Amino acid sequence: MNYVPPSRLAELEESATLKASEKANQMIASGLKVYKLDVGEPDFLTPRRIIDAAYRAMLDGYTHYAPSAGMPQLRSAIAEKYGVRMSNVLISPGSKQALFYALYSILNPGEEVLILNPAWPSYKQIVKLAGGVPVEIDTGSGFLPDSSELRKRIGRKTKALIVNSPNNPTGAVYDEKTVKELSDLARENNLFIISDEIYDRLVYEGDYISFRKHMKYEDGLILVNGFSKAYAMTGWRLGYVIADEKIVKEMAKIQGHTATSPSTFVQIAAVTALRECEEDVRKMVSEFSERRKIIIEMLDRKGIEYSRPRGAFYFFIDMSKYIKGVDPAEYLLEKARVSVTSGSGFGDGYRTYIRISYATSRDTIIEGMNNIFAAIGV
Ligand SMILES: Cc1ncc(COP(=O)(O)O)c(C=O)c1O
């Protein structure tokens, strides 16, 4: 049969971040030494306590289907943490899936969603999958959105704004003024705010302000979070979404007919993550913080300009001064044997940028950064 993908998939793109690291992995498989500063997940093991809890849960019989909105034990633990009711919480297999459920539950075909570039590439693709139209807005080199600029882009079809603080790829953490202004803007224009707070525990400097401080769920806040980054649980696939209960009901219907629910024992183990793993999180955050300091010192010593990241585990740096006419990530992979992520995947205006991840060992960071410096002649 001659397979032709349906028209609704015509504009769906592959994950740019995964594609780039695949090339580096091929080089490594062929025996070359490559420094991987492209990693999008913590390099730590999942805390032992969580693994033990999952094992115990399996032995205790948590190996059957779970309710479509999630296990009550975990929903109530999350509800308690956020000061909401269990009916406001849905558990999903990863926060990526939660974002899809959220967008699918609010968008009519052709409605627009504002995305702040540079942005994690999946937002645009998930909006398209959910039948919406992504509207990309650059945040310049400071990476903080300007609400007056955003106001100009709101039209009849605008339905939602996606925000992500701490941010992938920039590491920017929105200050209180920004969070308040965006929340006011959304309320005035009857827009949903989908706040992806997956990196909320990874803040190294200053305060973290969640959108829940300035916007209510009944006013259209849909908050997405998960266990991947804070607890080094990327492979467990567990996320959650907090929203008005009418939206949670719709999302539960979608999940009920697709994933059914995330794995039951994984949900039970996640209660242990929330209630007993603060010390593990603190240790991981402290190690990330040290690595961030190392990179800051190295960049400052070389006089390389960048916008100082306050959170997540990334630096997003414009290389146009040093690398011209070619994709900087491809150049560095070839010339420095360092795999970083190309800025092009995060928005057209950022083709000269690279994302450096410090979710890897200090040695890899130091040697990788020195190789980059040598390749660009600084
Ligand atoms: C900004 C952002 N949101 C969501 C995700 C997805 O996380 P999860 O593993 O919970 O699906 C990622 C993963 O890289 C991310 O960077």
Image (cartoon, rainbow, N blue to C red):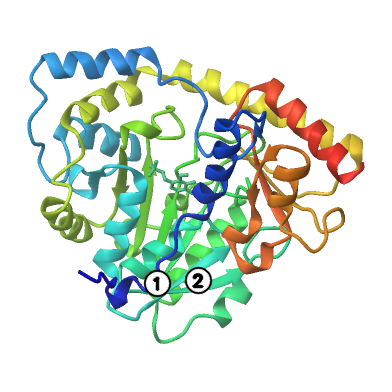
User: Is residue 196 in view?
Assistant: yes
User: Which residue is located at x 64 percent, y 36 percent?
Assistant: 37
Dot in front, 1 or 2: 1
Instruction: Pick whichever, 78 or 297, lies toward us.
Output: 297
- Mark 1 is surrounded, within 10 Å at the Cα level, by few (under 14), some (14 to 19) or many (20 or more) other residues, namely many
Image spot of residue 291 (x, y percent)? 68, 27
Question: How far, Cα to Cα, is label 1 from label 2?
Answer: 8 Å
Give the answer, above or below, for where 85 lies relative to 106: above
Work out which quarter of the rendered image holds the N terminus and state it: bottom left
Query: Mark 2 belongs to which amino acid?
Result: Leu
Split into quadrants, the picture shows ligand 1 in the one at top left
User: Residue at position x 69%, y 51% from top?
Assistant: 330
Left or right for 377, reference 58: right
Relative to residue 241, is residue 359 depicted above or below? Answer: above
Instruction: Please name the residue that numbered disc 2 is placed on.
Output: 185
Residue sitting at x 32%, y 18%: 50
In the displayed structure, does residue 196 sit left or right of residue 29?
A: left
Query: Residue 239 appears in which quarter of the rendering?
Result: top left
Q: Secondary structure at mark 1?
A: loop
Instruction: Tell me if 227 is positioned left or right of 57 in this view.
Output: right
| Crowd rating for badge 2 (residues with CA inside 10 Å; few <14, some 14–19, many 20+) | some
Residue furthest to the bottom in view is 156
Occupied quadrant, residue 359: top right
Q: Position of residue 82 (x, y in %)?
A: 34, 40
Residue 118 visible: no
Q: Position of residue 6 (x, y in %)?
A: 27, 74
Can you give x and y, in whole percent of width and height, for residue 254 in the image?
16, 57
Marks 1/2 in contact by CB < 8 Å: the verdict is: yes
Q: Which residue is mark 1?
A: 191
- Which mark, residue 164? none
Q: Amino acid at mark 1?
A: Leu
